[in-house]
Image (spheres, rainbow, N blue to C red):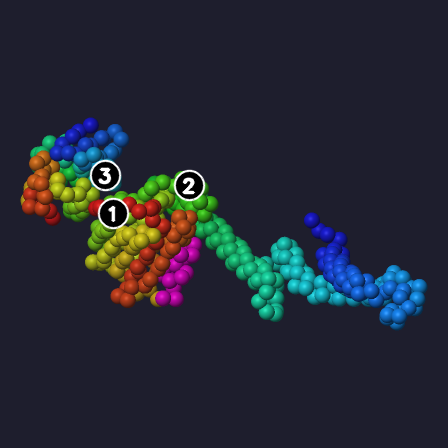
Amino acid sequence: MREVAGLRVDPFRREVHRDGRYVALTRKQFAVLEVLVAAEGGVVSAEELLERAWDENADPFTNAVRITVSALRKRLGEPWIIATVPGVGYRIDTAPTGSGREGGGRG
Amino acid sequence: MDRPPGPSVRLKLTLSYAGFLLLAGSLVLAAVGVFLLREGWFQTNEQGAWRVTPGTSFVRGFAPLAAVVMACLLVFGLLGGWFLAGRMLAPLARITHATRTAATGSLSHRVRLPGRQDEFRELADAFDAMLARLEAHVAEQRRFAANASHELRTPLAISKSLLDVARTDPSHDTGEVLDRLQAVNARAIDLTEALLLLSRADRQSFAREPVDLSLVAEEAAETLLPLAEKHGVALVTDGEITPTVGSPALLLQLTSNLVHNAIVHNLPERGSVWVTTAVRPTTVLLTVENTGEPVPPQLVPTLTEPFRRGTERVHTDHAGVGLGLAIVRSITRAHGGTLTLTPRPAGGLRITVELPTAGARPSAA
């Protein structure tokens, strides 16, 4: 069980709660979130996400990571909790600013 | 079950008519008798008596007349009742005849009751409608069984010829034979699994639980994204949270089939597939839309038939088992929903699955 920034991730029951609210996720969305949460706020590159949440046979030029992260971000809701670090990767924003619009990177 | 031919209802109705007539007749006669008695018309009074010979009693004066009237009524009631009951029951005999014919296997027979719209006509029309539906259903099942066995025979026949070749020509490359056998075998398994899925959806033997269609759509898109990228197709998923009730596995199958079809029946390059979900007041919508070759409108209704492929020139490596949309239709039906296929003016198809919503729930995304 890991908790970060109001997110509670239960890897055994494959359940995610944000501020006590249950969030239903697909398998890949959950796998991506697990990797990001495990990094504890550190930046995870798209390549690393692809390797750890998909498999070694995944096409390196796939859009899967971008698509899954944006769907995951939408499911987790506001304030946006997954920040995009341009050119580097993604990280969990441990202190998302209140209304969130300006703080969380989108896109 | 079978009654020896006899006019039982007709006889009962006739007796009832006659009985009622007699009852009414006796009442009228009784009323007349009481009236006459009270007015004193039957008294043996020498002056005021009304054309009655002295000494005649009420019974002797009135009874013969009453008896004649009652006898007339009885005859009239029996004859009229018999005639009327026969007329009323004639349509029933016709419907019975049609039912017997249908029971012996001839579903093409119809009652086709003439006349105006009454209860019998309604029964006959309902019966005809039922027969038409049964007939169509049986024909569909027969066609399905014939197609299924034909499709199942193909991989078996190919296996047989591969085995024959391997046996007669031992110098043949065993690895190649094994590879081809494996491919043929995999195809037979896919087909059998699709058939099982179809019958499972048709029997509606699955547990129902709350399902969010948008999550199912994202799951299907996730799984099929590699295929889409291989085909150079952009796969876009979007939409609100769409709560419904059903089997998550079957609904995932439905969505995957739709998205898979949309990907493989697309433009050779730079195609698109849009998967969207939406909430309506009492229903939820899943729409899968794709670019592609124009689809002739007259072809659209046949697309959901089993073993019917959109175009004859399907690329062999994409050719599914031909049950994809038939499975979608069965799963939609089993969930109490409707399936709509519309050709897009610019080519490709727009397929909408509309399912009942799972009660009101805030659709916060």
Residue where numbered disc 3 is placed: A23
Is residue B199 rendered magenta in the image? Answer: no
- The quadrant of the image that shows the N terminus of chain A is top left
Q: How many marks?
A: 3
Which label sits on residue B225? none
* Residue B80, percent from left and from top: 75, 66
Front label number (1 vs 3): 1
| Position above or below: B108 against A100 | below
> Residue at the location (61% across, 66% down)?
B113
Pointers 1 and 3 within a single chain: no
Q: Quadrant of residue B104?
A: bottom right
**How packed is label 1: few (under 14 Cα within 10 Å), some, or many (20 or more)?**
few
Q: Is residue B287 above or below residue A100?
A: below
The label shown at residue B206 is 2
Report in which chain the residue with disc 3 lies.
A
Asked whether the beta carbons under mark 1 and mark 2 sit within 8 Å of each other, the answer is: no
Q: Foreground residue, B309 or B247?
A: B247
Gap between marks 1 and 2 measured at Cα:
26 Å
Magenta-highlighted residues: B297-312
User: What amino acid does circle 3 point to?
Assistant: Val
The label nearer to you, 3 versus 2, is 3
Identify the residue under disc 1: B363
Asked which secondary structure carries label 2, the reply is loop
Report whether residue B216 is seen: no
Instruction: Report, in whole angstroms, how far the alpha carbon at label 1 lies from the one at label 3.
Output: 13 Å
1 or 2: mark nearer the eye = 1
